[in-house]
Image (tube, rainbow, N blue to C red):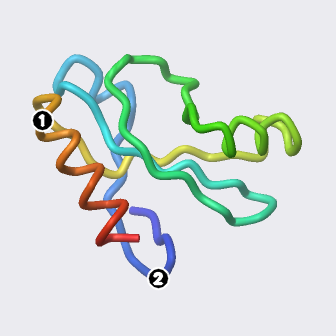
Amino acid sequence: MVTILGKNFPTYDFDKIKGNCFGFIYVTVNNKTNKMYVGMHYRWDKSYLGSGVILKNAIKRDGKNNFTRYIIDIADSYEALVELEVYYITSAF
């Protein structure tokens, strides 16, 4: 369980979900600034933090070791994953 912006979210272990679902929703938190990035991912790269330009620039500036990725939801299809991403971006955060 992780608390983000005062809300509790379950967390999933990457190694336990790999191969058991299509993909996942994640929140990457900059531990220096507390800024966060919400996204979806379905390629199984354990070190993946996100691909947005703002996030990549922050990683360059602050260093990869200052970021934590939390997997907060999983989906069994691409369509379900997209729906979850929209929900988390528009409603949960």
Q: Outermost residue, right direction?
A: 61
User: What's the distance in space between the residues labelled 2 and 1, CA to CA?
Assistant: 28 Å
Residue 87: quadrant of the picture: bottom left
Q: Residue 63: where, in percent of width, then height?
A: 84, 38
Q: Which amino acid does label 2 sit on?
A: Gly
Q: Decide if residue 21 is on the left or right side of residue 92.
A: left
Residue 30: quadrant of the picture: bottom right
Q: Which residue is drawn at 59% across and 58% down?
A: 36
Q: Which residue is drawn at 37% across and 25% down?
A: 15
Q: Which residue is drawn at 33% across and 70% down?
A: 92
The dot on residue 43 is none
- Find disc 2 in the rendering and name its residue: 6
Q: Which amino acid does label 1 sit on?
A: Glu
Residue 81: quadrant of the picture: top left
Q: Which residue is drawn at 50% across and 77% down?
A: 5
Q: Upstream in the sequence, badge 2 or badge 1?
A: 2
- Find disc 1 in the rendering and name its residue: 79
In what quadrant of the picture does the C terminus appear? bottom left
